[in-house]
Amino acid sequence: MDNAGVYKLTDDLAIVQTVDFFTPVVDDPYTFGQIAAANALSDIYTMGARPLTAMNLVCFPTKSLPISILKDILRGGLDKMNEAEVALVGGHSIDDTELKYGLSVTGVVHPKRLITNSGARAGDKLILTKPLGTGIITTALKAKAVTKKTIARVSQSMARLNAQAAELMVAIGVHGCTDITGFGFLGHTVQLAQNSRVGLKIDIASILVFPEAGNLARRGFCPGGLHRNCDFYSPSVEISSTVPEHMQDILFDPQTSGGLLISLAPSKATRLLKKLHQAGIKDAAIIGDVVSQPRGKVVVK
């Protein structure tokens, strides 16, 4: 399964479609709207495509929350769509007991320039463009166990579009890409390995993590999705005994609007990393290698 659906219209044009929505991950409605929109748009960017239109998806408890909250959420989403130069063309809302928001997004791409999560090649380097730990931190936020500084940094990262990183990777030419979202870092790397019929070697020392995530994981602020990811993907993962338990939790942690994981030739990896840093994507790092064996497995050392 890839990050979005693709339908070829002509020899030089295909449409790319995706949909994503979820419950609030931060307290501020406007920021939540921005994050939800950025998260939905990300699947289009991973495919090397350009998003064109979007439709709002809203579930809102009209009896328990003021309509001003919904207005702020929609304003945040619209501002992020405007930043992405995406036209809001409609949407749908229902009265629900639990608040949810997201987008259905349509983009376009040349069929021969499509980037998938099945194109990684043995010998490639892996680049990750955002730190890990959003699920653990937003879980701790519900218990008011996170500093304002950390929430501000994490919120800024989640609300940041993957547009610029995608534009740079398309320009330089890469073999494969996925984004790190609900299945966590290890879930998405396993998918990349299995779909590409290769193995992945991850250098744990190169993985960037948000401030407080490690300490919060040690204190048990782990979302339910983390344990489900671990149960499902562990058979395809080999983690060295030297990797601390809290770091293992972070690797399985479900992410919201995470970074791109890009597979590309070593000759291009250093150049792309430099361009990412010059573009202000300072957290981007080379975090591992693609190998021929063990096929479909991820090894973390």
Image (cartoon, helix red, strand yellow):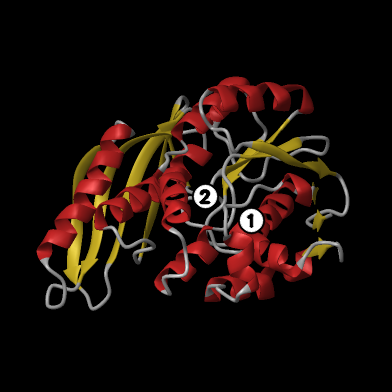
Q: Is residue 222 visible?
A: yes
- The residue shown at (72%, 25%) is 270
Judge by depth and name the residue closer to the eye, 135 or 293: 135
10 Å neighbourhood of mark 2: few (<14), some, or many (≥20)?
many
Secondary structure at numbered mark 1: helix
130 left or right of 199 in image:
left
Point out which mark residue 185 bears: 1
Q: Is residue 14 visible?
A: no
Using the image, determine if residue 125 lies above or below residue 185.
Answer: above
Q: Position of residue 84 (x, y in %)?
A: 34, 34
- The residue shown at (52%, 32%) is 165
Q: Which of marks 2 and 1 precedes in the sequence? A: 1
Using the image, determine if residue 206 lies above or below residue 246.
Answer: above
Judge by depth and name the residue closer to the eye, 130 or 46: 130
Q: Amino acid at mark 2?
A: Gly
Q: Position of residue 290 (x, y in %)?
A: 79, 42
Q: Amino acid at mark 1?
A: Phe
Using the image, determine if residue 172 lies above or below residue 53.
Answer: above
How far, Cα to Cα, is label 1 from label 2? 9 Å
Point out which mark residue 258 bears: 2
Residue 1 lies in what quarter of the image? bottom right
Secondary structure at numbered mark 2: loop
* Quadrant containing the C terminus in the rendered view: bottom right
Residue 176 lies in what quarter of the image? top right
